Image (spheres, helix red, strand yellow):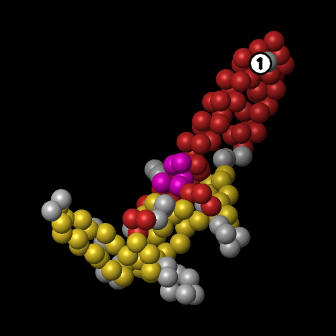
Amino acid sequence: MYNIGQIIYIYKDSNNSLFPCIVCEEVIKKTLEGIETYYKVLLPDTEGTVVDLSKMDVEVFTDLSLFKKEYVSRASNNAEASIKKCKEISNSKFKSFEKNNLESKSVEEENTTKKKEKIVIEDENNVKLNIDMSKLEELGL
């Protein structure tokens, strides 16, 4: 699955961090139950920590563009789910105020077309990634 010396990218959802590591060991274990293959990776810390990849609670990506595509897709899906839920709550709780909402909606739609949706992602080193969703849509991503 991986090659020794291959750089892979590990994403930890709990703290929203992405970092590289290198595959440093492939272990093939043969038992009566069958053959099991697992990998050990060298982390980019100062201690040179080697860990069993299967014991880590992370997602593994072999290419940063795959990570970007997945992350942007999740962000977009989360935004859509939040909007849907918000609309459902608004419709159930504030139906009587619908007339006022319709009048302000045309102004909101006008502003939305002017401002395309943007997402800002910040990692643990305070590095910010600004994503313009309209540009990704133009590229078919």
**Total tally of numbered discs in the picture:** 1
**Where residue 99 appears, x then y in whole percent?**
81, 15
Residue 123: x percent and y percent? 65, 67
136 lies above or below 84 = below
- Residue 54 in the image: above or below residue 94: below
Q: Looking at the rendering, in which quadrant would you find the N terminus?
A: bottom left
Rendered view: 18 above or below 47: above
Foreground residue among 8 and 34: 34
Image-quadrant location for residue 31: bottom left
Foreground residue among 70 and 29: 29
Span colored in magenta: 70-74
Q: Position of residue 141 (x, y in %)?
A: 47, 52
Q: Can I make out residue 63 in this image? A: no
- Element at label 1: helix
Residue 3 as seen in the image, left or right of residue 54: left
Q: Residue at x 67, y 47 (%)?
A: 116
State whether residue 37 is above or below residue 103.
Answer: below
Amino acid on which disc 1 is placed: Lys
Residue at 48 percent across and 61 percent down: it is 58
Q: Is residue 67 left or right of residue 101?
A: left
Q: Which residue is the site of mark 1?
A: 93
Residue 118 drawn at (x, y percent): 66, 52
Dominant secondary structure (helix, strand or loop) of the stretch shown in magenta: helix
Query: Is residue 120 in view from this perspective?
Result: yes
Q: Is residue 70 left or right of residue 32?
A: right
Q: Residues within 10 Å of mark 1 (few under 14, many from 20)?
A: few
